[in-house]
Image (spheres, rainbow, N blue to C red):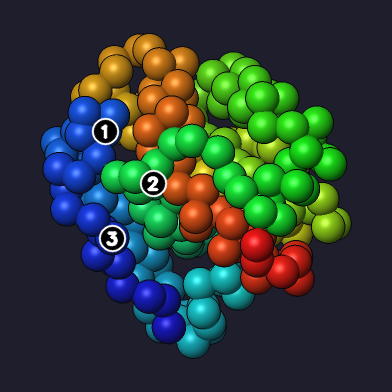
Amino acid sequence: MIPPLPALPYPEDALAPAMSAETLRFHHGKHHRNYVDTLARLIAGTPYADMDLEAIIRHTAASGDTADRKIFNNAAQHWNHSFQWKSLSPDGGGQPTGPLAEAIERDLGGFNQFEARFREEAAGHFGSGWAWLVLSAGRVDVMTTHDAGTPIAHDKVALLCCDLWEHAYYLDYQNRRADFIGAFLARLANWRFAEENFVRESGATAA
Ligand code: MN3
């Protein structure tokens, strides 16, 4: 059973002006909803109908079958967007603290280095996709994925994400993706959520 479209964890206008109510209304109410509805239609009557969302993603991630690719794309987009709403916060931006801050220092050379790399990889990513902070074999790392690509398909654990599809920022920033990335880092990134994910997945003790 796949989860339904989750409610946004904040009002539609809570992230403005960094992300407008209009962007959230279309992105959540139209784009994300369409992935959920399409996935439900594609898996009806198949063995995938009895699997949870992550299992569907893992089963279809490496498949070359056309029907499986469509299921993967919609399943991964459902998962990625559900994760994304929690990666944003009206009180976002700033820097992580505690064990996650220490891991970023240890594995990426500090928050400034993380931020520079995230900005560069996210702004430079060609076409549609996602930018991620992930946990990979016990270390934190920055990665981007193409289209519906998701860390789950690469055996990595997502800690925080930023949607790089034009539908995520075009109404507010048009072609200026770098400005959107800057606003994500400065005002939207939900470090409390990333810290919780890190502590749970790495076994580190919360500060
Ligand atoms: Mn999107």
**Gap between marks 3 and 2 measured at Cα:** 9 Å
Residue lying at the far bottom in this picture: please name it. 50
As drawn, the label of residue 19 is 1
Task: Characterize the local packing of mark 1: few (<14), some (14-19) or many (20 or more) Cα atoms within 10 angstroms.
Answer: many
SS state under label 3: loop
**Gap between marks 1 and 2 measured at Cα:** 10 Å
* Residue at numbered disc 2: 88
Determine the residue positioned at 75% across, 66% down.
Answer: 204
Q: Where's residue 191, x and y in %?
A: 51, 48
Residue 16 makes an appearance in the image: yes
* Residue at numbered disc 3: 9
Q: Say which amino acid is labelled 2.
A: Leu
With respect to residue 162, does 197 lie above or below?
below
Q: Earlier in the sequence, mark 1 or mark 2?
A: 1
Relative depth, front residue between 7 and 64: 7
Q: Say which amino acid is labelled 3.
A: Pro
Q: Is mark 3 within 8 Å of ligand 1?
A: no
Q: Say which amino acid is labelled 1.
A: Met
Badge 3 vs badge 2, beta-carbon distance below 8 Å: no
Q: Quadrant of residue 115?
A: top right
Q: Which image quarter holds the C terminus?
A: bottom right
Q: Earlier in the sequence, mark 3 or mark 1?
A: 3
Task: Characterize the local packing of mark 3: few (<14), some (14-19) or many (20 or more) Cα atoms within 10 angstroms.
Answer: few
Badge 1 vs badge 2, beta-carbon distance below 8 Å: yes
Determine the residue positioned at 49% across, 55% down.
Answer: 192
Q: Where's residue 167, x and y in %?
A: 31, 32
